Amino acid sequence: MPVSLERIREGLSRPQVLQMPTIEENELLQFRVEVTVNTWKEPTILERLGQELRASVPFSPPAGINLLSIAASIKDQIGAARRAQAERSAQRTVLEELAAFCEVNDCRATAAASPNVPDP
């Protein structure tokens, strides 16, 4: 593509079309951002049961007793107990597998370095 010096000179001699405003020291630029978050979440099973119970039960529990929070606490404790049992089971399985490995291989150097490895 040929370049014409005359066209370049002509373009440079024209007045500028786009003027960029300069920022004075006392002027501050302000940018505004709006963040919206969808706060709706799928109700849990306990929340659904609570809604159904509230709709079907003609009376409410005595003041100061929140049965739903009690049920949620019980659910959390059961979950924590199940996780702890699963961790203990996994640790037991690893120790059994290590013991079986050490029966076939020499693990004395490893056992001296790590107190959790069972002796062969």
Image (tube, helix red, strand yellow):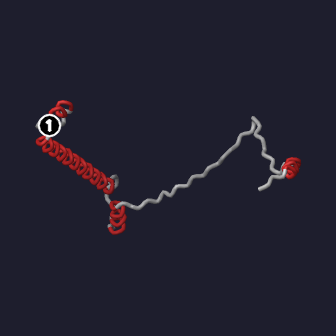
Q: Which residue is mark 1?
A: 106
User: Going 20% across and 31% down the picture, which residue do you hit?
Assistant: 113
User: Position of 78 compared to 29: left or right?
Assistant: left
User: Going 12% across and 42% down the picture, which residue do you hit?
Assistant: 104
Q: Looking at the rendering, in which quadrant would you find the N terminus? A: bottom right
The residue furthest front is 2
Identify which residue, 68 or 15, lies in the foreground. 15
Q: Position of residue 14 (x, y in %)?
A: 88, 50
Q: Position of residue 115 (x, y in %)?
A: 18, 33
Q: Position of residue 5 (x, y in %)?
A: 85, 49
User: Going 14% across and 37% down the picture, which residue do you hit?
Assistant: 106
Identify which residue, 49 or 11, lies in the foreground. 11
User: Position of 21 compared to 80: left or right?
Assistant: right
Q: Looking at the rendering, in which quadrant would you find the C terminus? A: top left
Quick check: 77 above or below 107?
A: below
User: Position of 65 compared to 24: left or right?
Assistant: left
Q: Secondary structure at mark 1?
A: loop
Residue 45 location, quadrant: bottom left
The residue furthest top is 112
Q: Position of residue 96 (x, y in %)?
A: 14, 45
